[in-house]
Image: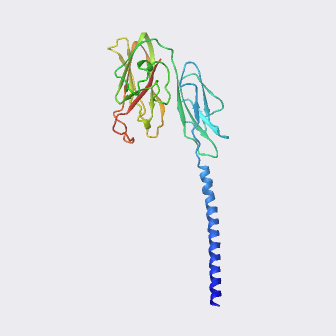
């Protein structure tokens, strides 16, 4: 009799454990369902892709914005402001007739809004006849580009800094003097740079512009600061542009001032920041 009671006690305990386990599993599944749903809802859209045949253009440029996700809406601005759902809805390619900074963002009810993508396009002024280009220093032997003339050939480098369009300098400032065939009117000068902190390439601090007809007594037209490379930056193009009242002269001098050292947040902190330049534009 004692053995029978012990047997049925074991069966009872076993059934309790089974029922408890099933109930716990059911509770866990029910409670985890919202979690799974929230994880699905928490997927972020990638940033839209801005495409064009080139960064520099002469007359007009067609720019497209791509994102192949059904139901997505893309908004953009061409004035440098951050886009929102109140900005222009992208429906067809954008036709640029002047220099513009395009910023774009993607929205979808089932996803988190994308980050802002941006790309700056430059309309070139009329080509100027140039007699000579001089630099106060030579680029690093690993990144020589095509020499001084590469700075005024009106060709934009790619994001691959090892191509011939880029010249790289291991720290320090850079001074460039351009002699024109004859006196010309200028009202804007732009330096084109690369920012790629993963490759220890940083934007310069500022550029200063001088212009005139006497090479030894050029008039300073101004200085423009350039936003410093940020820790979150990826490999991107950046420009430093200075606008001024029209000034006539035969010589143009551009001084590019570099930062003294790589910032504290970078593994190379305290060492020389690399400077990469592919073009100096003027109009």
Above/below status of 18 relative to 58: below
Which image quarter is the N terminus in? bottom right
| In the image: residue 100, left or right of residue 21 | left
Residue 183: % across, % down: 42, 10
Q: Which color scheme does this rendered protein use?
A: rainbow
Please identify the quarter of the rendering in which residue 258 is found: top left
In the foreground, 125 or 14: 14
Residue 53: % across, % down: 58, 25
Please identify the quarter of the rendering in which residue 7 is found: bottom right
| In the image: residue 247, left or right of residue 46 | left
Please identify the quarter of the rendering in which residue 148 is found: top left
Q: Is residue 241 visible?
A: no
Above/below status of 182 relative to 154: above
Q: Residue at x 63, y 83 (%)?
A: 9
| In the image: residue 260, left or right of residue 282 | left
Above/below status of 118 relative to 147: below
Q: Residue at x 49, y 26 (%)?
A: 157
Residue 259: % across, % down: 36, 32
């Amino acid at each position: 009799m004692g053995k029978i009671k012990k047997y049925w006690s074991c069966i009872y305990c076993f059934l309790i454990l089974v029922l408890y386990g099933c109930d716990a599993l059911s509770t866990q599944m029910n409670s985890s369902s919202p979690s799974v749903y929230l994880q699905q809802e928490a997927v972020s859209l990638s940033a839209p892709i801005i495409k064009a045949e080139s960064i520099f253009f002469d007359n007009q440029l067609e720019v497209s914005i791509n994102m192949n996700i059904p139901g997505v809406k893309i908004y953009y601005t061409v004035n440098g402001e951050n886009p929102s759902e109140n900005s222009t809805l992208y429906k067809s390619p954008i036709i640029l007739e002047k220099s513009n900074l395009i910023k774009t963002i993607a929205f979808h009810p089932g996803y988190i809004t994308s980050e802002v993508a941006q790309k700056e396009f430059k309309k070139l002024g009329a080509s100027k006849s140039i007699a000579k280009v001089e630099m106060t220093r030579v680029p690093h032997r690993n990144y020589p580009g095509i020499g001084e003339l590469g700075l005024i050939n009106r060709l934009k480098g790619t994001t691959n800094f090892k191509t011939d369009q880029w010249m790289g300098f291991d720290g320090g400032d850079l001074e460039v003097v351009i002699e024109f065939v004859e006196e010309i009117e200028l009202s804007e000068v732009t330096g084109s740079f690369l920012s790629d902190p993963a490759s220890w390439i940083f934007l310069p601090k500022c550029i200063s512009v001088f212009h005139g007809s006497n090479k030894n007594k050029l008039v300073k037209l101004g200085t423009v600061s350039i936003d410093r490379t940020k820790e979150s930056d990826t490999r991107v193009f950046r420009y430093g542009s200075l606008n001024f009242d029209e000034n006539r002269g035969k010589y143009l001098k551009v001084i590019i001032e570099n930062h003294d050292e790589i910032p504290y947040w970078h593994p190379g902190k305290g060492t020389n920041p690399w400077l990469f330049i592919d073009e100096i534009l003027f109009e």
